[in-house]
Amino acid sequence: MNLEQYLASRRELVDKALDDMLPGEDNEPAILHKAMRYSIFAGGKRIRPALAMASAEAVGGKPAEILPLAVALECIHTYSLVHDDLPAMDNDDLRRGKPTAHKVFGEAVAILAGDALLTFGLGVLSLPNVARMYRLDRLVPVIHELSVAAGSTRLIAGQVMDIVFEGKEVTPEIVGSIMANKTGALIRASLVCGAMLAGGDSEEVGILGRFGELLGTVFQIRDDLLDIEGDPAKLGKAVGKDNTRGKATFARVVGTEKTIEMMQTLTTSALETIEPLGKRVEPLIAVGKYIGIRTS
C-alpha cells in the first residue's frame, strides 16, 4: 500500500471534521478560539486519528464512522503539546516549524486554550448529534477509556514523571513507565477506542491494545532519538534539549545503540501481535513500520 497517500487521505478527513466541529475563530472569546485553531491546524500528521481509523478497519468498520473519535483524539493530543511547550514545562519556541501557542498568544491564553482543547475533546463523543451515531454500550466505555488515558494515572502521570526525574539517575523501568504513560496511553486509546466503536470483540480489542502499548513506546523512543540525531529543519524545532535538561530517556540510560536495538525489537513484537487479525491490519502494519523510521 502507499502509506503516504493513505495518511494524506485520513488527514484530509480529520482536518475537515476538526474544522466543522471546533468553534469558529469569530466565536467569543475570539482570542481563545483563535489559539485553539492555531494549535490544531499547525501541521500535525494526525497519527492518532489515523491509527483509530485503521483499528476500526481492522475489525470491519469504516473510517468515516469514527471521525468524532478522531477529532477527540487530536484535540486531546494537541492540548498536551500546547502545555508541554510552556515555559514551565519544556519551554519550546517552535512546534512543527511555527511559533508555539504561548509565543503567539501569550502564556495565559495558551494554558486556557490547552484546557479548552482537552475539555472539548473529552466532550465531543457526548454531543447529542454524535452520541446518536453509536450504540450506548460501545460509546460509554470509549468515553471512559479516553478519560482514563488523558488523566492523572496515565498521560498526565507521564508528564509529571518526566518533570520529576529530570536530571536524576533513572532505571530503564522508570523510563519505560514514563513512555507508557506520556505517549503510550493515548496511542493505545486510539487503537482500543477505534476498535470498540466499530464493534470489535474483546479479543480483537485486547490485541489492538497490546499493539498500541508497544507502538507507543516505539513512538517515544523515536522521538528521543530524533532529538539526538534529527534535522531541526525537518523536525521544525530545536534538537539536543533532552540531553541538556537531563531527560529520562533510554538513550541516556543504556546508550543510543542499545536504544535503537530495543526500538527495532519492540517494532517487531508489535507487528507480530496483530498478525492474528489477518489482512485487514495492512494499514496498521505500514503505520507501525513508519513510526520507527520517521524523520519528523
Image (cartoon, rainbow, N blue to C red):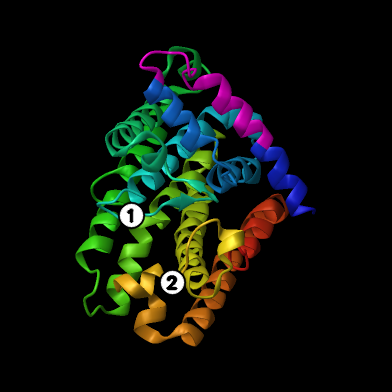
Lower sequence index among marks 2 and 1: 1
How many C-alpha atoms fall within 10 Å of the one at disc 2: few (<14), some, or many (≥20)? some
User: Does the magenta-highlighted stretch encompass residue 218?
Assistant: no
Residue 139 lies, in percent from the top left, at 43, 28
Q: Which residues are magenta?
A: 12-30
How many C-alpha atoms fall within 10 Å of the one at disc 1: few (<14), some, or many (≥20)? few
Name the residue located 52 percent from the left edge and 74 percent from the top edge: 263
Residue 53 lies, in percent from the top left, at 61, 40
Q: Are marks 2 and 1 in contact (CB under 8 Å)?
A: no
Name the residue located 47 percent from the left edge and 14 percent from the top edge: 26
Q: CA distance from mark 2 to mark 1?
A: 13 Å
- In the image, is 10 to the left or to the right of 240? right
Q: Quadrant of the N terminus?
A: bottom right
Residue type, mark 2 in image: Gly
Name the residue located 52 percent from the left edge and 69 percent from the top edge: 226
Name the residue located 46 percent from the left edge and 51 percent from the top edge: 94
The residue beneath circle 1 is 91
Residue 27 to residue 118: above or below: above
Residue 62 in sight: no
User: Does the magenta-highlighted stretch encompass residue 13?
Assistant: yes
> Residue 240, which numbered label?
2
Q: Based on the displayed image, in which of its 4 quarters is residue 80 positioned?
A: top left
Of 186 and 230, nearer the camera is: 230
Residue type, mark 1 in image: Asn
Residue 25 to residue 138: above or below: above
Mark 1 lies on a secondary structure that is: loop
Mark 2 lies on a secondary structure that is: loop
- For the image shown, how many numbered marks are present on the structure? 2
Q: Based on the displayed image, in which of its 4 quarters is residue 78 positioned?
A: top left
Residue 181 lies, in percent from the top left, at 34, 57
